[in-house]
Amino acid sequence: MYAIIETGGKQYRVTEGLKLKVELLDVPVGSVVDFTAVLVNNDGIISTGAEAKKASVKAEVIYNGKDKKIHIFTYKAKKNVRKRQGHRQPYSQVQITSIVG
C-alpha cells in the first residue's frame, strides 16, 4: 500500500515506515502530522479525488533543521561584476507511521 501526499507545494510517494525530508512544518519534534492524500493505492485498487481525501496519512516529526549549504556564484564576464551567496534550506524530517485508506 502506498499513497501520494501533498505538502509544501510538492508531492511525495510514501509507504509506511518511510523517512523523508519535507518543507519545514510549524510543529514541534515528536508531534504527529496528518497529510492530505492525492492518490491511494491499496493492493491495486486506486483511489483519487474525493475518495483519496477521506484517506489519512499520519507521520511523526523526527527532526527540524537546515540542509547542507549550497554556494551560489554569479558573474558577468568582462564587467568585473561578481556576487557570492549561500543558502541553507530549512526542512522537517518525518516518518510515515500509518496509511489508512
Image: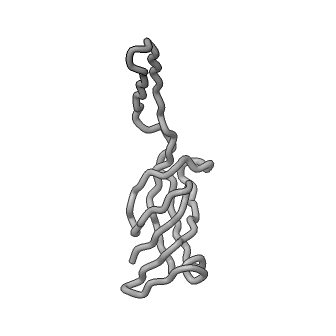
The image quadrant of residue 46 is bottom left
Which percent across, then down, holds residue 65? 49, 39
User: At 56% from the left edge and 54% from the top edge, which residue is drawn?
Assistant: 8
Which percent across, then down, holds residue 60? 50, 58
In this view, which residue lies farthest toward the top?
A: 80
* Quadrant (top left, top right, bottom left, bottom right) of the N terminus: bottom left
Left or right of 53 in this view: 16: left
On screen, residue 90 above or below 55:
above
User: At 40% from the left edge and 28% from the top edge, which residue is drawn?
Assistant: 71
In this view, which residue lies farthest toward the front?
A: 78
**Front-lying residue, 100 or 4:** 4
The coloring applied to the image is one colour
The image quadrant of residue 19 is bottom left
On screen, residue 44 above or below 26:
below
**Front-lying residue, 29 or 51:** 51
On screen, residue 66 above or below 100:
above
In this view, which residue lies farthest toward the bottom?
A: 45
Which percent across, then down, holds residue 37? 53, 71
